[in-house]
Image (cartoon, grey):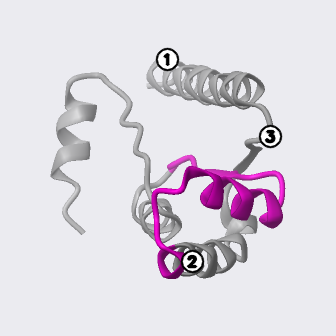
Amino acid sequence: MGLTLLDRIWDRGRVPMLDLETKGALAIQREVPGAVTIFVKAPSFEELERRLRGRATESEGEIEERLDVAERQLELEPRFRHRIVNDDLERALAELEEIVRGELDAAASMSGRDSSSR
């Protein structure tokens, strides 16, 4: 997997944040040491179905396909470092922000220790 885009981001002193499907996130987790993964899910499968149907933007077949994919993705949840239940948007965003800030602080702390020990 070519990580040139990620390399360019790191070379600029930035931390890349990617919004990926489960398989892509797990591939990055395997290929990038220290990658942090966050699994975001609806509070229940029934709520996910209700949300999809409530949008009325997809056909019945597309909804069924999305539900099948979601069911398979839920099986991968334990492989992610963090989990967020999207039951309340503001709370879920606050939790995401807390996780990201915590991970960035931990990474900064580790890099500070690495450079001072050289």
Q: What mark, if any, has residue 69 been given in the picture?
A: 2
Report the amino acid beneath label 3: Asp
Residue under pointer 3: 87
Of callouts 3 and 2, the N-terminal one? 2
Query: Which stretch appears magenta?
Result: 34-62
- Does residue 62 appear to the left or right of 109 in the view shown? left
Residue under pointer 1: 116
Of callouts 2 and 1, the N-terminal one? 2
Quarter of the image holding residue 78? bottom right
- Does residue 51 appear to the left or right of 21 in the view shown? right
Q: How far apart are labels 3 and 2 at the CA level?
A: 20 Å
Q: Which is in the foreground here, disc 2 or disc 1?
A: 2
Callout 1: helix, strand or loop? Answer: helix
Q: Is residue 77 above or below residue 41?
A: below
Callout 3: helix, strand or loop? Answer: loop
Of callouts 1 and 3, the N-terminal one? 3
Q: How far apart are labels 2 and 1 at the CA level?
A: 46 Å
Structural crowding at the residue carrying mark 3, measured as other residues with C-alpha within 10 Å and reported as few (<14), some (14–19) or many (≥20): few
Q: Residue at x 61, y 21 (%)?
A: 101
